């Protein structure tokens, strides 16, 4: 009998009296970076998804290549709640360096699967421990030496499959997807999974209440990350030029463009590409290329994160003042400076809104789910060209890089909105043309595309002061007229930007405003708070400048908590700046530690704020 077997059979059955807990747990896999565990974790997430169970997968990884601690959190919940939670129910402990820390974050009555090279702690009698004989299983499978670390991770997949009753065929199907149908790779990994499951069946009596069972599956749902969705949305929105420089967590957006564009955007007759994706030498060059491409009529974009946004400031100001349409995706991460490159945040709201020097106010879209990343991927081009301005789309690492269950992507039914673009025929009919003349009062002056074959089409694009004919001018009246027109244009944009999403409860006096990837935590927290007797209304902002409905929401509540993942309460400050008369109704609640917002913190933060309000 092995030590693992003896230890297991002597362990007390602390969970025997509990009822089964089905499709409701948080599982944390604690490993080290570069060990290949991502393949194992994705196989589990995909298997749950294919069994019809609502699931999310969040990777907390270091910013080095190999060797530092990594945690992968899988949330399974039959009601569809997939936000982070402070404590885990199940732990797979594969990292000796963090074993104690990981165990401390395990719920009372939780379950720990551990590499049997680790010593089982004696101070957690409330926990069910299952040893995993990783080394013995690897020896029996005998994979190629260079693949041992990767294949060893499949041992915990096999044990979990057996003890949680995960459909082993769904795991096989998930691996087939991951390896692109390469049967030898699938077979090698399945050999370990089958062996580990068999070992668990023979040696690990079930002593915990957790298991999964198949649910009716909505075949329209997708399992996808936001960066992939954004890339596909941009493609369906007609992206022509994408210039970028590698940066975590935005790189995979451009990489997905490079992957999907050859399949979707090649000329059917010649087979040649109808697009250009360019890796620039730095972020300045990346946005400079996008501005140049946008100027000549291409649908142009770049993608970056906070440090890149800082470098793009001057070119963004040029595009704003010269009125050149481009799209910039900012997949936010922790700052300032290099900060925590592989941690999530919402710290670019204020910097992007007023990016560049002088009076600039940038239009911003803020998706809260992958289907909105897809939608805003194409809609951002329409808005940029309609209003002849840079449009920034603010995602974040959690939404961009992690796995989300998503609604199906809706193909845009309306035609592309290229805005006011004059043809040679229209110029001939007009008989006169001034690039920056507002002809109908909406602040948007018609543009021409370079190369338009008409003598009136040419104009001088400049970032300096100019009159309506694009002629250099330092006259105060010309400057005032131009800025007033720009402001009028941006004010009109409010009506066409994506509207906020409103969720209401009966007789709610308390409001919550949030945005982006915090949505799942807030949706779940509101249900718990309602069960305790606190009804709340919830408004999720999806665009800046704000619509009038945001003002109406604030006015309609006694107090409004603005919840966000940054330290300064940046959205809170923008709202106060927009409507100073309503500032006292707004209370900032912030969390900014690089980890996706969790339900538990949200509940506690609102509770404490309400206690303070009523005590005051």
Image (cartoon, rainbow, N blue to C red):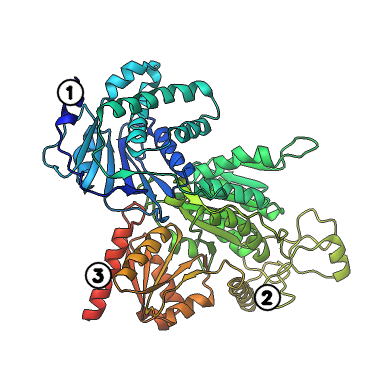
Closer to the eye: label 2 or 1: 1
Q: Which mark is residue 442?
A: 2
Q: Name the residue under label 1.
A: 3
| Frontmost residue, 309 versus 479 | 309
* Pointer 3 or 1: first along the chain: 1
Residue at image position (20%, 40%) is: 128
Mark 2 to mark 1 CA distance (whole Å): 78 Å
Judged left or right of residue 126, residue 479 is right
Of labels 3 and 1, the one closer to you:
1
Q: Relative to residue 462, is residue 215 drawn left or right?
A: left
Can residue 484 be seen in the rendering of this structure? yes
Q: Position of residue 540 (x, y in %)?
A: 46, 67
Relative to 99, residue 512 above or below: below
SS of the residue at dot 2? Answer: loop
Q: How far apart are marks 3 and 1 (CA)?
A: 49 Å
Q: Which residue is drawn at 30% across and 25% down?
A: 199
Q: How crowded is mark 3: few (under 14 residues within 10 Å), some or many (20 or more)?
A: few
Of 91 and 309, nearer the camera is 91
The mark found on residue 608 in the picture is 3
Q: Which of marks 2 and 1 is nearer the N terminus?
A: 1
- Residue 336 horizontal side relative to residue 277, left or right: left
Q: What element carries label 3?
A: helix
């Amino acid at each position: 009998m092995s030590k693992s077997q003896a230890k297991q059979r002597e362990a007390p059955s602390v969970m025997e009296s509990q009822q089964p807990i089905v499709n409701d747990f948080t599982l944390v896999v604690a490993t080290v970076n570069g060990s290949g565990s991502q393949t194992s974790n994705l196989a589990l997430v995909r298997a749950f998804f294919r069994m019809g169970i609502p699931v999310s997968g969040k990777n907390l990884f270091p910013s080095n290549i190999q060797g530092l601690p990594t945690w992968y959190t899988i949330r399974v919940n039959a009601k569809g709640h997939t936000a982070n939670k402070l404590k885990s129910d199940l732990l797979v402990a594969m990292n000796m360096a963090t074993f104690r820390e990981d165990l401390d974050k395990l719920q009372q009555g939780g379950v720990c699967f551990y590499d049997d090279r680790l010593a089982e702690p004696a101070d957690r009698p409330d926990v069910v421990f299952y040893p995993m004989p990783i080394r013995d299983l690897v020896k029996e499978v005998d994979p190629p030496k260079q693949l041992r670390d990767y294949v060893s991770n499949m041992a915990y997949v096999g044990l979990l499959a057996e003890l949680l009753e995960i459909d082993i065929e769904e795991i096989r199907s998930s691996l087939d997807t991951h390896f692109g149908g390469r049967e030898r790779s699938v077979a090698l990994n399945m050999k370990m999974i089958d062996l580990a499951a068999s070992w668990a069946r023979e040696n690990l009596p079930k002593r915990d209440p957790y298991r999964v069972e198949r649910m009716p599956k909505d075949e329209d749902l997708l399992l996808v990350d936001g960066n992939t969705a954004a890339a596909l949305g941009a493609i369906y929105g007609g992206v022509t030029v994408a210039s970028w420089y590698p940066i975590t967590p935005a790189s995979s957006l451009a990489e997905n463009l490079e992957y999907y564009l050859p399949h979707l955007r090649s000329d059917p007759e010649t087979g040649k590409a109808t697009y250009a994706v360019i890796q620039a030498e730095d972020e300045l060059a990346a946005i400079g290329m996008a501005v140049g491409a946008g100027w000549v009529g291409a649908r142009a974009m770049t993608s970056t994160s906070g440090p890149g946004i800082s470098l793009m400031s001057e070119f963004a100001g040029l595009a704003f003042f010269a009125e050149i349409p481009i799209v910039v995706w900012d997949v936010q991460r922790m700052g300032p400076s290099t900060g925590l490159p592989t941690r999530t945040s919402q710290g670019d709201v204020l910097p992007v809104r007023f990016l560049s020097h002088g009076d600039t106010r940038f239009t911003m879209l803020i998706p809260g789910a992958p289907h909105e990343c897809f939608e805003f991927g194409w809609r951002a081009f329409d808005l940029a060209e309609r209003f002849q301005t840079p449009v920034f789309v603010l995602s974040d690492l959690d939404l961009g890089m992690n796995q989300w269950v998503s609604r199906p992507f809706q193909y845009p039914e309306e035609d592309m909105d290229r805005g006011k673009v004059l043809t040679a025929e229209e110029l001939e009919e007009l008989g006169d043309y001034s690039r920056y003349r507002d002809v109908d009062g909406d602040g948007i002056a018609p543009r021409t595309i370079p190369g338009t074959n008409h003598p009136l089409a040419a104009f001088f694009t400049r970032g300096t002061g100019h009159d309506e004919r694009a002629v250099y001018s330092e006259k105060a009246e010309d400057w005032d007229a131009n800025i007033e027109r720009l402001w009028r244009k941006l004010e009109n944009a409010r009506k066409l930007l994506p509207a906020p999403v409103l969720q209401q409860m009966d007789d709610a006096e308390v409001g919550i405003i949030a945005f982006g990837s915090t949505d799942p935590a807030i949706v779940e927290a509101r249900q718990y708070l309602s069960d305790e007797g606190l009804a709340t209304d919830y408004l999720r902002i999806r665009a800046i400048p704000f619509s009038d409905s945001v003002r109406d929401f604030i006015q309609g509540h006694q107090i409004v908590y603005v919840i966000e993942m940054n330290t300064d309460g940046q959205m809170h400050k923008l709202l106060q700046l927009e409507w100073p008369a309503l500032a006292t109704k707004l209370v900032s609640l912030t969390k900014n530690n690089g980890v996706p917002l969790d339900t538990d913190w949200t509940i506690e933060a609102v509770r404490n704020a309400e206690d303070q309000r009523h005590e005051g």
